[in-house]
Amino acid sequence: MLPFVAMWFLGFLFHEMAFGLLSIFLPLYVVNALGGSLTDVGIMIAVANFMAVPFSFFWGYLCDRTRRYRLFILVSFAGMSLLFYMFSLTSNVWLLIVLYGLISVFHVAHEAPRNVLIAEYYSREDWERSFASYEGLTEVGWLAGLVLGLIFSGVGLPNVWFILFVSLLNLVAFVASLFLIRDPLFIFERRLVAIEKVFSFAHRGLAVASRAFEGARITESLKGESVMLFCVGLLVFSFATNMLFTPLPLFFANDFGLTQSVVFVVFIFNTLGTTTGYFLAGARAEITDEKGVIKRANLLRALLSLVFVAVAVSPSIFILPLAVLILIVMGLVFGFFWISSLSLSMELIPEGKAGLFYALVGLGAAFGCFLGTFIAESFGFPILFGAVSVGFFVSYLAFKTYA
């Protein structure tokens, strides 16, 4: 294996650090510093995700067509660095919404190429472990971003410096990727996996037919996997996740009365749970039932969202540890879900449509973040958490029946 392969993810580490800091800072900045509303935050993130959906297809198709994956990763990081610098130059909420939408267009440019690089650098047997290693290490970057947000908030750094630092981190990601990423010499692993699935299905069919001719009782179901139902499950999971997490920093800031620094601490615990989930998923890759994992993850998230209803009814400093524990477990579960769904998607989604995975995630996020902020502001957080629970259960049903 070429020596740069072990370090090619370093640029993504800095990129995730930037978005870890931004994830908590942005809603607090719009509402508390600029005087915007929670709905403004939802509109901003919804517009960004809607704009990203067609470009997820576009970048995914283009990188597979040209087979120049490194180029699109560099375009992504360079574009975001420039646009975040422009983001720091204005405090007009509507102009920020437009700029954040443009940022999302460049953000998705690196996602499909990154997944393809992992799938092509490593064999199918190593996909789960490779995805888990990448996600776990970049989640450390996200965690570092939250810690930086905590430090910057603690010393009272001006808001514009938060945004400029996000721009700088994406610039560093660009420079690191420029030197460390190379395109694979041969691109065939996903095609081999697709061929193996066809032969495996044909073999099962012949085995069932042979037993039927011999008069044996057939109990095995010869049914292919439904890509459509898998996509529905992924879409609804993203919808429910963003419906929950987009307004959640404001829930802790306003309902619990926490300062910005303490809100960063709360979400540091959530990220620690996610990081642990990624590494555990990688360590258990050989014995993990991917299809079972994604079903159990949705059920558990549905139950935890219901517990959040009780937390929202009587938020207090005494019940705060329970809320933090829920976030830790949700993060842990997400780590397992994400690795399993990524690996399965590389099997199910054909070459040339590598952007479909993130297009579905983005579409679910677009609806989820807007509806989540709208419900929270109009009807309150208890209603929101109940709706989120229903969403995760619907996702469970889709994943339960797709195969």
Image (tube, rainbow, N blue to C red):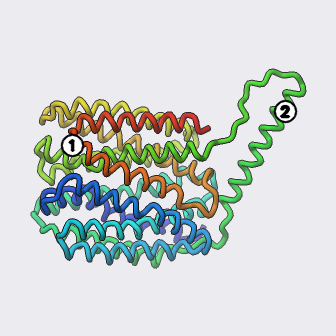
The image's mark for residue 378 is 1
Q: Amino acid at mark 2?
A: Ala
Q: Amino acid at mark 1?
A: Ser
Q: Residue at x 55, y 39 (%)?
A: 288
Judge by depth and name the residue closer to the eye, 37 or 322: 37
Farthest residue to the front: give it: 378
Image side of residue 329 versus residue 74, left or right: left
Judge by depth and name the residue closer to the eye, 29 or 317: 29
Image side of residue 245 versus residue 207, left or right: left
* Label 1 element class: helix
Give the class, few, some or many, for how many residues have Cα within 10 Å of label 2's Cα (few <14, many ≥20): some
Image side of residue 182 versus residue 218, left or right: left
User: Picture coordinates of residue 174 (x, y %)?
Assistant: 40, 75
> Reading the chain from its start, which is encountered first: label 1 or label 2?
2
* Label 2 element class: helix
Question: How many circles with numbers are drawn on the protein?
Answer: 2
Which quarter of the figure is the N terminus placed in?
bottom right
User: Picture coordinates of residue 351 (x, y %)?
Assistant: 63, 61
Q: Nearer the viewer, mark 1 or mark 2?
A: 1
Residue at label 2? Answer: 209
Which quarter of the figure is the C terminus placed in?
top right
Judge by depth and name the residue closer to the eye, 44 or 354: 44
User: Picture coordinates of residue 237 (x, y %)?
Assistant: 43, 44
Q: Locate residue 65: give its quadrant.
A: bottom right
User: Picture coordinates of residue 244 (x, y %)?
Assistant: 31, 44
Report the Cα–Cα distance between label 1 and label 2.
58 Å
Give the class, few, some or many, for how many residues have Cα within 10 Å of label 1's Cα (few <14, many ≥20): few
Q: Residue at x 66, y 67 (%)?
A: 187
Residue 48 vs 195, above or below: the answer is below
Q: Residue at x 36, y 70 (%)?
A: 102
The image's mark for residue 212 is none
Q: Locate residue 211: give its quadrant.
A: top right
